[in-house]
Amino acid sequence: MNPLNHARALLLCGTALLTAAAPAASVWSERGPAWGGRLTGFVAVPGSGGNILLTASPGGGVWRSTNGGGTWTQPANAGTGDYSVVHLEWDAVTPGRLFALSYSGLHASTNRGDSWTALIGTGGNPAPLLPYQLSVSDPKPFAQMRFSATQRAVFASIPCGGFYYSFDGTHFTQTWPFSGGSGNPNNCIGTIVADAVSGRVYFSTLALNPSNPAPVYRSDCGAVKWGPGTPCLHWVAASGGLPTNSLVSSMVSVSTPGSGDRLVLQTTGTASNLMTYYTTNGTSWTLQSTVVNTWSPRTLLFTGTGQELFAGYVWAGHSTNFGTSWATFLTAANHPDTRAIYADAAAGKVWTSNDGSMSGSYANITRWNWTPGATPTAGVDLGHAGLTVWQAYYAAVVPVTGGAAGARRVFVGTQDNAGACSDSLGASNWTDAGAPPGYGSGDYFALQTAPSAPNFAYAWSGQGVSFARTTNASSAANCAAVSWTQVTPTQNPAGAPMSLPIFWSRHAIAIHPTNPNRVYFAFFRDVGVSTNSGAASVLITHHALPGNANPTAIYGDASNAIYVGTAGNGAYVSTNDGQSWAPWGLNTNSPAIITAITSSGGASPTYWIASTNGLYKLHAGSWTLAAGGQGYTVSDVKVDAGCGTRVYAAYGFVGLRGQHRGGIDVTANNGATWTSITSGLAIHQAPVSEVDVDASLPGMVYAASYGRGFWVFNWGSSLPACAP
């Protein structure tokens, strides 16, 4: 094993990283905001009348409420390791036992989330990366088949990990349905369904193919079915009638005694339409309905009553005819994108959770009165107090001109929940006033402030034709006084789109170190260069990379060189504003994604590339692996402006391709040795999407976490000395 990673590989949930601990004088502060966030798992404790609830967040971990959702706190979570939890489900035969599926493993708890036992993986080792796709976000492949009051099988998968099964719910066997291991997208399972009536198991995969129907398979061993202690691991295609070039987002068995192999699934068709299909034989599917402009479907629930289904898409849907028609139910303040639905017939309630609450005005969780077979009524917006589970992409910190010594302002951007601003680094308040406008998009993934002029900032929030600009990010009296302008630039060639990159991060934008008007963009298929971004009329010139590679991160240095990282093609450099490009690094055996590029500057700089294969440095003419690797993604790298050998590496965030437990390591000797500064904290168990160092206060470090919001680190008197 790579010695750079032995500590991370041995790390189990809740234990400290086996590297030198940060000095006691240093302090981390979690700053929120406590405005909710993406919630992909939800359950109520049976018999509690809906008072004891648990919810889960990809990156935020498991949370619990004991007052019906009025307030939320995080249970101990000991043993989870990875906070990227995507599904919660009660054990089918053991009362009070709860399963939690994460990106890195499967865990079980018998004390409502206070402690967890690892069943698949440890939560400390990353799963392989998912194939690039947009139809299935946060896959949650998990199912149970109940044979009797004491017998069942449990099925699960983690990203590109094949198919796992267990007959006791504790000891699991991993199998590969198809050859090729994790490199075969058909071994990347998105949904699992267990049909107890027929004794068959179904799953969908992430093998998107424009010529083939949505990939669905079922077990087929002739007369042998799944039974107590008896597996069936022969898989055949079961996708007749499904649309081509599509992926199944959700699937459920609706079989009843005597009528097996009856299932309903949902997939996204053309124009982002929700398409519901039904089968009565498990192999031939019939289109039930099409709901236009609903974006991707996310969850599907069969209540066991008649033909009643619940579905999560933009809103929540209810059907009493197996999806032939849908009735939408939502509150006036409901946030789009329903991620989880839980129904409790005994309590007479159904709950939905979604992508967040933005500035706190949206409902993150709703509760409805429900009688099986009837449309939910009397929806109530539940509180999200205490839920610090924002999926943050960046935390851009600027000094406040004219403010108190050391005064700082921070802009935080997130997935689906827009942005926020704070004049106290989140210590006392957050507001959406002063955050850059999204112009119709809630995905605030890129914002950069000019290194030479902190008043200048540029933000890109998912628009294909414009970006936002401010010239008073630093001098505004408060967040509300920060003014932004929408800039719709002229494109060269005319009509070229500002198409979004396939990897969303702050590094989709870069600003020249000494010229705040020179701005670079990483677009989907090319690079945008603007030399007049501060002008009234802005021009962006587009330049393709060799082989039409996909840019993923961009960086510019003081010599006007532009460095671009890509998806699968390494990094390139241009010294003529993008007119021509030369291979620069990692162009052979390239990482799946280069996440960030930076340098130490100076006459003899060290260059750094963060990637899904780890952190590389270029010094004295050669690239070497400095940290990470072996499945550990380094999602960001920052060099202290006052000390070129003091470097910070953030771990765990890969966007749609996956995520794993994160944390931040630091070196003060240019990568010769590294020390964790996050061990034992929630930020170590959540993906860290970005890390930054205060240019004039090097003892202050800032981090954005995908699932745990914004964090501040103060070295106090313990800042490591700068090595020569």
Image (cartoon, helix red, strand yellow):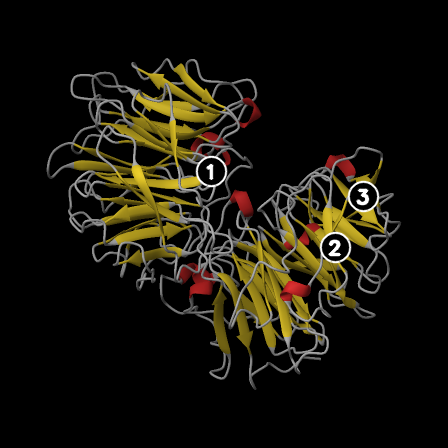
Residue 207 in percent (x, y) is at 50, 28
- Left or right of 156, for residue 389: right
Does any portion of residue 86 appear in the rendered image?
Answer: no
**Mark 2 and 1 residues: CB-CB less than 8 Å, in contact?**
no
Rendered image quadrant of residue 338: top left
Nearer the N terminus, badge 2 or badge 3?
2
Dot 2 falls on a residue whose secondary structure is strand
Mark 3 Cα-neighbour bin, 10 Å: few <14, some 14–19, many ≥20:
some
202 left or right of 621 in image: left
Mark number displayed over residue 489? 3
Residue 250 in sight: yes
SS for callout 1: helix
Nearer to us: label 2 or label 1: 2
Q: Earlier in the sequence, mark 1 or mark 3?
A: 1
- What residue is shown with label 1? 182
| Vertical position of residue 97 compared to residue 699: above or below | above
Q: At 29% from the left edge and 31% from the top edge, which residue is drawn?
A: 375
